[in-house]
Image (spheres, rainbow, N blue to C red):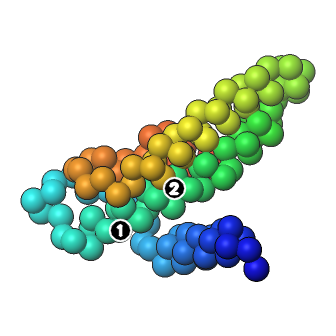
Amino acid sequence: MKRGNLMLIVTAGILFLLATSMPAMADGYRNIETASAQDVVDAMAAKGVRGAANLATGWAEIPKQIYVTGQDGGWLRGAVIGPFKGIGMAIVRTVSGAGELATFFVAYPGYYDPWIEPRFVWQPE
């Protein structure tokens, strides 16, 4: 097996384990003096997994925005405007995911809040 494929499998496995084993974090931690080491690690893991998920699923904003725009303003509007909104949101979600994934290890109070709402593409707005 090639080294690149092995690294991809190992990385995907680690992300899966983090995503399925960590508790849900509401807003990360706010005060570094009162945060336990476990709070910091949980917040770091939550931000890292959220960043990886948004980086990988940013493209899903395109069909989501077509659907949401169609529900709110009619299907003609969804078909015409939805793809443009989706492309814009896909760029925003992918870039924010990359940013969160690149900076999840920075221990700073309040820094673990999500960069974009909703936190994941599959959550309602």
Residue extending furthest front?
2
- Tag 1: residue type? Asp
15 relative to 84 in the view: left or right: left
Residue at point 48%, 52% (across, down): 101
x then y, percent, for residue 37: 21, 71
Q: Crowding near pointer 1: few (<14 within 10 Å), some, many (20+)?
A: many
Answer whether residue 39 is visible to the viewer in this image.
yes
Answer whether residue 68 is visible to the viewer in this image.
no
**Lower sequence index among marks 1 and 2:** 1
Q: Which residue is mark 1?
A: 42
Residue at point 73%, 31% (across, down): 86
Hey, which quadrant is residue 24 in on the image?
A: bottom left
Circle 1 SS class: helix
Residue at point 47%, 43% (across, down): 99
x then y, percent, for residue 113: 37, 47
Which numbered tag is attached to residue 21? none
- Tag 2: residue type? Arg
Viewer-nearest residue: 55 or 120: 55
5 relative to 11 in the view: left or right: right
Residues under numbered marks 1 and 2 in contact, where contact means CB atoms less than 8 Å apart: no
x then y, percent, for residue 46: 43, 62
The quadrant of the rendering that contains the C terminus is top right
x then y, percent, for residue 122: 66, 51
Image vertical order of residue 53 relative to residue 58, above or below? below
Circle 2 SS class: helix
Hey, which quadrant is residue 47 in on the image?
A: bottom left
Viewer-nearest residue: 16 or 80: 16
Gap between marks 1 and 2 measured at Cα: 12 Å
Which numbered tag is attached to residue 50? 2
Residue at point 53%, 45% (across, down): 98
Instruction: Report how many numbered discs are placed on residues in the image.
Output: 2
Image vertical order of residue 115 relative to residue 72, above or below? below
